[in-house]
Amino acid sequence: MKVLIFGATGMVGQGVLRECLRATDVELVAAVGRTAMGTHDAKLRKVLCADIGDLRTVEAELTGFDACFFSLGVSSSGMKEAAYERINYGLTMAVAEMLSRLNPGMTFVYVSGAGTDSSEKGRVMWARVKGRTENALLRLPLEAYMFRPGIIEPMDGIQSKTPAYRVFYKLAKPLLPLLRRALPNQVLSTRDIGQAMLAVARQGYEKRILETRDIRVTKRGAS
């Protein structure tokens, strides 16, 4: 299996990258990003592109893939809806539309979040935009799956790129394993999410929108 990863330096992206590099049935991992990353592995290819919203310069490097794991995006904190939508909807759709042309029928796993609004009409701005993005992806000629994790426990030395989140996770680190056991349908680890993404790429899933419980169930069948 050959896979693409967008957002490989983020917390979820690091998790799925780790699982892909460890998986014996993954022969190639192409990580697409604006800057070089520190991870090195024989089956990792780094695809650098200054503008992720315009992939024409690297189009030839994006063909022949079976799956794409997409976890790019920005926080909605302090952002107007138009700016947030331009990044989280516009960029995502630009990538997905190109990949649907280059690799029709490929598996495309998009990470949105718990509380995403499929109606696109709710009061919460980020949830509306994520819902619009999910709906648009599901209309493309892709095997698209939407992952909606809630609280995420970073494992294996993985850290968030956002300073405020790093502080939160440092303070919450002793509690997260306990919460994950006490609230299994609300808390997942980066390892859980990465393994579930691979499981969906291998065998699909009965639902196209996966909440935390579905992700956990899918992860159990990953091996």
Image: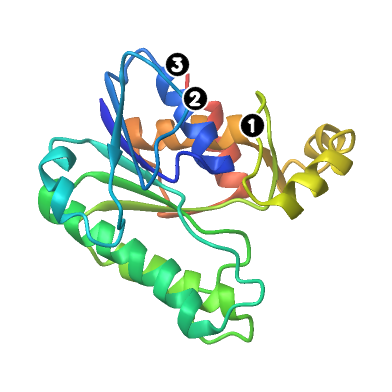
Q: Is residue 43 left or right of residue 220?
A: left
Q: Name the quadrant containing residue 3.
A: top left
> Residue at left 45%, top 39%?
8
Residue 181 % position (x, y): 81, 34
Percent across and percent down for residue 146 are 44, 55
Sequence-wise, the earlier of marks 3 and 1 is 3
Q: CA distance from mark 3 to mark 2?
A: 6 Å
Label 1 CA crowd tier, 10 Å (few <14, some 14–19, many 20+): some
Count neighbours of disc 2 (C-alpha within 10 A) and say few if under 14, some if 14 to 19, many if 20 or more. Answer: some
Mark earlier in primary sequence (2, 1): 2
Whether tag 2 and tag 1 are in contact, CB under 8 A, the answer is yes
- Residue that badge 1 annotates: 158
Q: Which residue is mark 3?
A: 22
Q: Residue at x 45, y 16 (%)?
A: 22
Q: Nearer the viewer, residue 147 or 102?
A: 102
Residue 124: quadrant of the picture = bottom right
Mark 2: which amino acid? Arg
Residue type of the residue flagged with mark 3: Arg
Residue at the disc numbered 2: 18
Tell me the SS state at disc 2.
helix
Dot in front, 3 or 1: 1
Nearer-the-camera pick, 32 or 131: 32
Question: 170 or 142: nearer the eye?
Answer: 170
SS at mark 3 in the image: helix
Mark-to-mark CA distance, 2 and 1: 10 Å
Q: Is residue 116 visible?
A: yes
Amino acid type assigned to the residue bearing label 1 in the image: Ile
Q: Is residue 200 above or below residue 34?
A: above
Q: Which residue corresponds to the image point at 27% horizontal and 18% vertical from the top-left? A: 27
Q: Which scheme is used to colour this image of the protein?
A: rainbow
Q: How many marks?
A: 3
